Amino acid sequence: MDILYSSRILFVSYLIATYIDGVPYAVRPNVEENKFELIKILKDSQISNAFCSPNKTGAVNILKWINKNDESLSSKGLQVCPEARFFR
């Protein structure tokens, strides 16, 4: 008797995001101005413009850096969230 083993490898990406007046926003890098900024996430296609970390630890480290170095963004209640939360 042959035994078939099946495994699923799930990859979860993480965003740094918040809600402002019920609208989801995510952080994205602005290379020209050398800073992070918020963008609205109203469609799935807009997620590709946001900073996406392949692991939660990386996203948490970036969020810690933002909270320490950017007064404007740190006051927005940012959180690390699974990217899938924003798919509609």
Image (cartoon, rainbow, N blue to C red):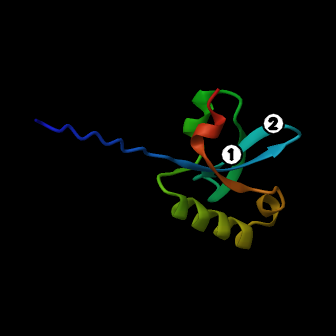
The answer for how far apart the CA atoms under marks 1 and 2 are is: 10 Å
Q: Quadrant of residue 50?
A: top right
Residue 20 x %, y %: 85, 43
Q: Residues within 10 Å of mark 2 (few under 14, many from 20)?
A: few
> Quick check: 63 above or below 11?
below
Q: Residue furthest right?
A: 21
Q: Secondary structure at mark 2?
A: strand
Q: Position of residue 53 (x, y in %)?
A: 51, 53
Percent of width and height locating residue 49: 58, 39
Q: Residue flagged by tag 1: what amino acid is it? A: Ala
Q: Give the residue displayed 68% in from the left and 45% down from the top.
A: 26
In the figure, is residue 73 to the left or right of 56?
right
State the quadrant of the C terminus.
Answer: top right
In the image, what residue type sits under mark 2? Val
Residue 8 is drawn in which quadrant? top left
Total labels: the figure holds 2
* Residue at the extreme front of the image, as rendered: 1
Q: Residue at x 36, y 44 (%)?
A: 9
Measured as percent of width and height from the top left, residue 55 is found at: 49, 56
Mark drawn on residue 83: none
How would you rate the neighbour count of disc 1 (Cα within 10 Å): few for under 14, some for 14-19, many for 20 or more?
A: many
Q: Residue at x 71, y 56 (%)?
A: 79
Q: Which residue is mark 2?
A: 23
In the rendered structure, find residue 26 and report the number of the disc placed on it.
1
Q: Say above or below: 42 vs 83.
A: above
**Which residue is at 66% across, 55% downward?**
36
Q: Is residue 52 found left or right of 23 in the rendered image?
A: left
